[in-house]
Amino acid sequence: MSKIQKIIGPRAPADTSDEERKQFLIPTLLFAAAGILLLISIFLPYWQMELRAPQYPKGLHIKAYLDELEGDLFEINTLNHYIGMRPLEEAAQFERSISIIAITAVALLVLAAIFIHTKWVVLLVLPAILMPFMFLADLQYWMWNFGTHLNDEAPLSNAIDPFVPLVLGKGNIAQFETVGLPGTGLYLAFLAVILVVVGLYFHRKAYKPLVEKEQLAAGGN
């Protein structure tokens, strides 16, 4: 047996009954759905924030897609300028430049996992499991970076101490309140995580006996 065959693993036996064949179909459908959800998520916002203050009764809003920001950027950047915070567009420039390609690659790896019937499937789906958590961690890092590296020469630099806005949930900056929420794209990414994890369970249940049978046969030879 070649190394490639050992990685790909066995196929369902030709004489498998229709009822038994369903157990091989379940992980395929779950991985396929997860990959498609990740591809769809590319076009949707991954994060959103509302800035509340007395002078803004309707609040100021930002939506963060994988590669761009939209919303009340001018107003928020103007407020940030007075306290010494850099424009939001300067955050995560490298991450945004590769995000579309990266998520597409992650989705394709999950789809490729459909054809791997051994324990090596974990390596293909692991990036999809980690991705939404890494997104939030990276976003929180930039929140910390921007909030704790204020320009001392800003007009109101002495009026506010360094701060760290929360990526998720409520936070307070002087008289302002921030509310961070997941975007639709991030919800889809987390749903993809659930589908992948459940898919791994059914994948192991379906193919582990076949792998062990194949290994036993190879050992007997």
Image (cartoon, rainbow, N blue to C red):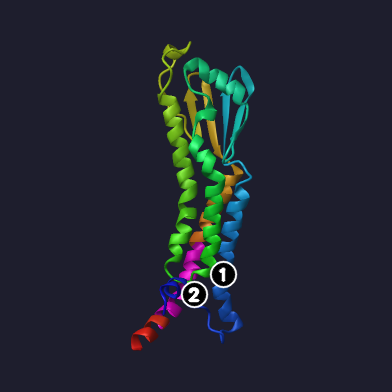
Q: Is residue 168 visible?
A: no
Start and end of the magenta stretch?
A: 198-213
Amino acid bearing label 1 = Ile
For the point 45% across and 39% down, the residue is 138
Q: Which mark is residue 206?
A: 2
* Relative image position of residue 201 (x, y in whole percent): 47, 67
Task: Classify 10 Å Cα crowding around label 1: few (below 14), some (14-19), many (20 and above).
Answer: some
Q: Secondary structure at mark 1?
A: helix
Q: Callout 2 environment at 10 Å: few (<14), some (14 to 19), or many (20+)? A: many
The kind of secondary structure the magenta stretch mainly shows is: helix
* Percent of width and height locating residue 41: 60, 48
Image quarter (top left, top right, bottom left or bottom right) of the N terminus:
bottom left
Query: In this rendering, would 101 be left or right of 212?
Result: right
- Reading the chain from its start, which is encountered first: label 1 or label 2? 1
Q: Residue at x 54, y 67 (%)?
A: 114
User: How much space separates mark 1 and mark 2, taking CA atoms?
Assistant: 9 Å
Q: Return the residue nearer the eye: 207 or 179.
A: 207
- Residue at the farthest top position: 155
Question: Which image quadrant for residue 71?
Answer: top right
Nearest the viewer among 189 and 58 is 189
Camera-side residue: 13 or 59?
A: 13
Q: Could you tell me how many numbered marks the image carries?
A: 2
Q: Is residue 18 visible?
A: yes
Q: Position of residue 107 (x, y in %)?
A: 55, 55
Q: Please give the name of the residue rendered at 56% of the width and 84% of the height, measured from the top-left corner.
A: 16
Helix, strand or loop at mark 2: helix
Q: Is residue 8 magenta?
A: no
> Which quarter shows the C terminus?
bottom left
Q: What amino acid is found at the position of numbered circle 2 in the picture?
A: Ala
Q: Identify the residue position indicated by label 1 in the image.
A: 26
Which residue occupies the foreground of this view, 2 or 87?
2
Determine contact: label 1, label 2, CB under 8 Å.
Answer: yes
